[in-house]
Image (cartoon, rainbow, N blue to C red):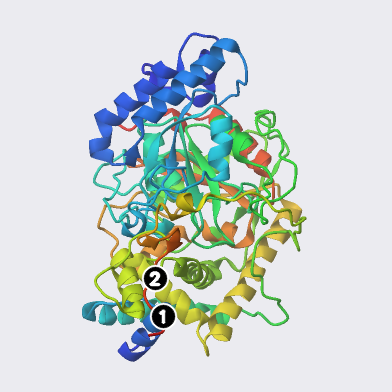
């Protein structure tokens, strides 16, 4: 069972703001989903290595060759706030 | 054939090259069709009329001179709005990216542009490709052309509906747990999920990076082969994209499947499967047998864990991928505060919809301290078991066949429980977890609604599943039927 406290803790980890009413609804929904997911505990995974990806490739490497990149104004075109060709952020440390 | 928009890509391509049809005519026919029916279907988030006609004129110049002509030259296509199109809005069906214009093209777009294809517009989707109904689009739901009160499936519902309604000759979608095959099934079109690494993911906005693949929707297996031929292949900008040579998909459509070993996974006849789906699929399997395939039962014993493993792995990856939406670099940004953390949390609170929030929460939970081993690590082990099921099955069989989805198209608003919606993908998810390829093709009807037949192939066996699909189309007419609702 996912209680309010857990929902708020997880939301904090995810930096996800939630409305009051969303907290209870998410708690209920996540509880139901995790109940279904509990079926995983029935699988016999002894001696099985975890698979993190479906690719058959390993250690793909290439030469590190410098190449021209985008002009700053191109990359900043979607920025909500900018100044002097930089992203503008709020103060991290006062 | 009575209308230009009803042509297949293969048919239109021949007429274009013979000079019997111009790309401008063909493109206008599709833009007219969009104007005529998209008010009802709502498959498009954006129609790029001017660009389409400009590209069509350019294609006509090539067709006239004969230079640089490919099977896709002058063919009007539409693109799921999760694929980056340079300077053209790419919203991912989200408020977060409502005004985002990518500074670059996805690799698949570069390939389509180089082939001379025409882009009609961007298609609607569940937000960030999370959903199975297209109802989770932040903008509007898409309607199924076969019954406008029903969902087209998702997340690539706009792409499937556009092809089904004749608003595009083909489209691109993306499939993370079934997002191409399930809407293909519900809309009676061909929808192919390539092998993981067959098509570059560069410029595909990431949902779950170990599962995502771009693939085509079309009205025939041959058309899917033509698009696959163009978009497949290695890409230095996607290290997970395979150097495996791309086969000649069109040449593999021999119509001959005699002696091909086709397995029927028993576990895919899940509880709650609709009788109409069961009947249609069994009849279709019988047709494969009549075509000379050797059909036999096969067991994929870990199928029952697929949805659970997926709903740990995919949200875990999504929670990491979506952490980039911070309101600083691009996208929606909450501005009414000077406080950094508040701005970040409010940006994500207002920018994401309910399903995306749910997945971020599940993923963050599964990766959080104390739960990582019990959930994420265990899911990755189960994933290995599911992959092993397929490895063993493909030692005995060339192709596996099943329903794509346990049910036909459901009504918009009918499924409100999140987990019930997740079960839409119970038969498509295992292929993503294993990384193998699969295609859904029109496989019959149940009470007038389409039933999809899923063909699964081993790694890089797109040629085989397309060969079976094409052979099946030669003895059936399901794929040639048009929805009467529009």
Query: Quick check: do tags 2 and 1 share a chain?
Result: yes
Q: Toward the viewer: B313 or B398?
A: B313
Which residue does the numbered mark 2 point to in the structure image? A89
Q: Quadrant of residue B332?
A: bottom left
Image spot of residue B231 (x, y percent): 60, 39
Around disc 1, counting alpha carbons within 10 Å, would you say few (fewer than 14), some (14 to 19), or many (20 or more)? few
Residue in the foreground of this view, choosing between A6 and B342: B342
Look at 72% across and 59% down and name the residue there: A56
Q: Using the rendered view, name the quadrant where residue B33 is placed.
A: top left
Q: Position of residue B29 (x, y in %)?
A: 35, 21
Residue shown at the point (43%, 42%) measured from the top left: B87
How far apart are labels 2 and 1 at the CA level? Answer: 8 Å
Mark 2 Cα-neighbour bin, 10 Å: few <14, some 14–19, many ≥20:
some
* Residue of label 1: A92
Tell me, for residue B153, which label it has, or none: none
* Residue B42 position in % (x across, y down): 28, 41
Judging from the image, what secondary structure is the residue with disc 2 in? loop
- Residue A1 in which image quadrant: bottom left
Position above or below: B400 against B64: below
x, y percent for residue B289: 62, 39
Left or right, B234 with respect to B486, comes to right
- Which quadrant, please, contains the C terminus of chain B? top left
Q: Quadrant of the N terminus of chain B?
A: top left
- Label 2 is found on which chain of the structure? A
Q: Is residue A35 left or right of residue A23?
A: right
Q: Chain of mark 1?
A: A
């Amino acid at each position: 069972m996912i209680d309010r406290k857990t929902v708020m803790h997880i939301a904090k980890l995810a930096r996800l703001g939630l409305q009051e009413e969303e907290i209870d609804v998410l708690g209920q929904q996540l509880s139901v989903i995790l109940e279904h997911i509990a079926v995983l505990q029935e699988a016999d995974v002894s001696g099985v290595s975890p698979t993190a990806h479906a690719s058959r490739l390993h250690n793909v490497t290439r030469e590190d060759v410098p190449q021209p990149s985008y002009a700053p104004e191109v990359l900043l075109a979607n920025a909500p706030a900018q100044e002097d060709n930089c992203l503008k952020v709020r103060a991290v440390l006062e | 054939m009575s209308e230009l928009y009803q042509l297949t890509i293969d048919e239109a391509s021949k007429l274009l090259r013979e000079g019997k049809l111009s790309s401008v005519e063909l493109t206008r026919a599709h833009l007219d069709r969009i104007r005529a029916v998209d008010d009802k279907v709502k498959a498009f988030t954006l129609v790029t009329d001017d660009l389409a006609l400009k590209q069509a004129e350019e294609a006509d110049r090539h067709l006239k001179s004969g230079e640089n002509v490919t099977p896709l030259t002058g063919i009007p296509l539409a693109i799921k709005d999760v694929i980056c199109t340079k300077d053209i809005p790419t919203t991912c069906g989200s408020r977060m990216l409502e005004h985002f214009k990518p500074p670059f093209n996805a690799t698949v777009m570069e390939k389509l542009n180089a082939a001379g294809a025409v882009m009609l517009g961007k298609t609607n989707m569940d937000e960030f490709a999370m959903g199975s109904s297209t109802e989770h689009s932040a903008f509007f739901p898409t309607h199924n052309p076969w019954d406008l009160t029903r969902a087209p499936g998702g997340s690539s519902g706009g792409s499937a509906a556009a092809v089904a309604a004749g608003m595009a000759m083909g489209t691109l979608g993306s499939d993370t747990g079934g997002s191409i095959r399930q809407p293909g099934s519900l809309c009676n079109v061909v929808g192919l999920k390539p092998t993981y690494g067959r098509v570059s993911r560069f410029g595909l906005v990431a949902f779950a990076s170990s599962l995502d693949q771009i693939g085509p929707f079309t009205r025939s297996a041959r058309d899917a082969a033509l698009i696959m031929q163009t978009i497949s292949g290695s890409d230095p900008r996607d290290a997970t994209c395979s150097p495996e040579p791309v086969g000649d998909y069109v040449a593999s459509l021999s119509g001959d499947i005699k002696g091909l070993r086709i397995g029927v996974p028993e576990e895919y006849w899940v509880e709650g499967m609709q009788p109409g789906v069961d009947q249609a699929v069994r009849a279709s399997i019988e047709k494969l047998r009549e075509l000379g395939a050797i059909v036999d039962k096969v067991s994929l014993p870990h199928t029952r864990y697929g949805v659970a493993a997926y709903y740990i792995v995919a949200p875990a990856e999504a929670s990491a991928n979506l952490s980039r939406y911070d309101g600083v670099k691009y996208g929606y940004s909450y501005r009414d505060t000077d406080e950094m953390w508040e701005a970040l949390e409010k940006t994500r609170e207002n920018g994401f919809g309910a399903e995306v929030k749910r997945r971020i929460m599940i993923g963050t939970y599964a990766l959080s301290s104390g739960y990582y081993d019990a959930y994420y690590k265990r899911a990755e082990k189960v994933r290995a078991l599911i992959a092993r099921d397929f490895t063993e099955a493909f030692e005995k069989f060339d192709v596996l066949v099943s329903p794509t989805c346990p049910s036909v198209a459901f009504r918009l608003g009918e499924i409100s429980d999140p987990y019930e919606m997740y079960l839409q993908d119970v038969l498509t998810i295992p292929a993503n977890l294993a990384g193998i390829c699969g295609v859904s093709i029109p496989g019959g009807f149940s009470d007038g609604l389409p039933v999809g037949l899923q063909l699964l192939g081993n790694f890089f066996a797109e040629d085989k599943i397309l060969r079976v699909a094409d052979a099946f189309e030669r003895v059936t007419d399901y794929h040639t039927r048009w929805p009467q609702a529009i």
